[in-house]
Amino acid sequence: MKHKIYWIEGDGIGADIWKAAMPVINAAVKKAYDGKEEIVWQELLAGEKAFAQTGKHLPKETLETLKTAEVAIKGPLATPVGTGIRSLTVAMRQAFDLYACIRPVKWYKGIIAAVRRPENVNMTIFRENTEDVYSGIEFAANTEEAKKLVKFLNENFNKNLKAECAVGIKPMTEFGCKRLVRRAIQYAVKNNLPSVTLVHKGNIMKFTEGAFQKWGYEVAAQEFPGQTITEQEVRGGADPQGKIIIKDRIADAMFQEALLRPEEYSVIATTNLNGDYLSDALAAQVGGLGMAPGVNMSDRLAIFEATHGTAPTAAGKDIANPCSLLLSAAMMLEHIGLEKAACAVQTAIQNCIDKKTVTQDLAKEIENAKAVSCSGFGKLLLQEIDSM
Ligand code: NAD
C-alpha cells in the first residue's frame, strides 16, 4: 500500500535533518513491512525555500494542497522578518484550525536528565492551539484602541483600570475546550492509559480557565460515561474498575507535580498558554527539546513537526540532531497505522544512544559519548534498522 505524505523541508537546519531522516523513515517502513507498505513523499514549499522560488513564504499552492490533505510533516520554519506573518507555524495552525498540539514526553535511557527518576516521566500533553491569549487581540499601552477599551470597561462594567493600561483578551469557548479534551480522552481510551488530567488556572481566571475545567469534566461525563471516572469519585470510595481517572490540577501545582510525582500523570489536557509552558518544561525535564516530537491536528489534517527552531548557527554544517523530526515521523507512522515502522525508528534511536554514538548536542548529555555528524548519525540509524 502507498501512503502519500506531504513534507515541508523547513529553514535553517531543515535541509540537514531531512537529508538524514528521510532515508531512515523509508528504510523503517520497508524493513517493518517487507516492502509491502511504502511512503510516497510530495514536497510542499514553505519558508525561505518557497520565498526564493515563488516570492511568498506560504504560497497559495501549499495552502490549497493542505486544504484537502490528511497528513503532512514539516521541518522548522523561521519567522520571516518584515512581512505581515508573525509565524508561519502559527499561520498554518490558524489557517487549518489545527486545534490540538500533541506532544508526547518520555525519557530515552542514557540521556542525562535534570531529574533523579526521568524514567517516571511518560506524559502526552494535549494543548489547545487556537484560543486563549494567543488569539492576538492585544493593544499596546496608551494607544487609541487600548484607551477606548479601558474606557468602555470602566464605564460599562464598573472596573477601575488605569487609563494607560496595555490590554489583552483571552477568549475561550465551550466548543474549543471540549473538542480538545474529547481528543485527549479518545487518545487515553485508544492507548489504554490510566488518567487524563485537566490543567487550568481556574482559581484565578474563573470564567475562562475555570470553564475549561468544568467543560472538561462535562465531556468526560456526557461522552465517555462508561470509560471514565473522576478522581473525586475514586477518593469517595468508588471502584475505578480499570476506567480512566479524570483529574484536574491548578497549573502552578502541576509544575510541581510533574517534577515530584510524574508517575501519577499520563495524558494532560490544557489551555494554550499553560500547554506552551508545560510542554517545554517537561521536555527539559527528560533531556531537552532536541528529542521532543509533536503534531498539530484538526479533525482532518495532522501536521507533524520537529518541535525545535531553525538553529541558524548550525544550518548547513551537518551537525544538527535529526531526532525530533524522526520521533515526529514515528508519531506520524503510528497515526497512519504503520506502528511497526514507528517502533523501528524509535528502537534505532535508542540503540544509537545505548552505543553512545550521537550528534554533538546529545553527546554533551551522555557520558563518554562520541559525537557524529547529522548525516553520520543517519547512516548509523540505517545500519541499526538493517540489522533488526
Ligand atoms: P532554536 O530551536 O532554533 O535554537 C535553540 C538552541 O537549540 C540553539 O542553540 C540551537 O543551535 C539548538 N538546536 C535547536 N534544534 C537543534 C537540533 N535539531 N540539533 C542541534 N541543536 C539544535 O530556537 P531559536 O533560536 O529561538 O529560533 C530560531 C528560529 O526558529 C526563529 O526564526 C524561530 O522563529 C524559529 N522557530 C521555529 C519553530 C517551528 O517552526 N516550529 C519553533 C521554534 C522556533
Image (cartoon, rainbow, N blue to C red):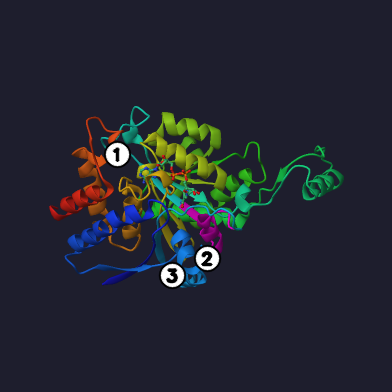
Q: Position of residue 310 (x, y in %)?
A: 43, 49
Q: Amino acid at mark 1?
A: Gln
Q: Position of residue 294 (x, y in %)?
A: 41, 51
- Marks 3,2: beta carbons within 8 A: no
Q: How crowded is the residue under tag 1: few (<14 C-alpha within 10 Å), some, or many (20+)?
A: some
Gap in angstroms between the C-alphas marked 3 and 2: 20 Å
| Residue at image point 24% right, 51% down | 378
Q: Nearer the viewer, residue 130 or 55?
A: 55
Question: From which residue to which does the magenta span run?
Answer: 85-101
Q: Mark 3 vs mark 2: which is more N-terminal?
A: 2
Gap in angstroms between the C-alphas marked 3 and 1: 36 Å
- Marks 1,2: beta carbons within 8 A: no
Q: Whereabouts is ligand 1, in terms of quadrant?
A: top left
Kindly tell me whether mark 2's CB lies below 8 Å from ligand 1: no
Q: Amino acid at mark 3?
A: Ala
Q: Is residue 225 visible?
A: no
Q: Position of residue 32 (x, y in %)?
A: 19, 60
Q: Which residue is mark 1?
A: 360
Kindly tell me whether mark 1's CB lies below 8 Å from ligand 1: yes
Q: How crowded is the residue under tag 3: few (<14 C-alpha within 10 Å), some, or many (20+)?
A: some
Q: Which residue is mark 2?
A: 56
Q: Mark 1 vs mark 2: which is more N-terminal?
A: 2
Q: Nearer the viewer, residue 85 or 200?
A: 85
Q: Is residue 328 left or right of residue 254?
A: left
Q: Which residue is mark 3?
A: 69
Residue 78 inside the magenta-drawn segment = no
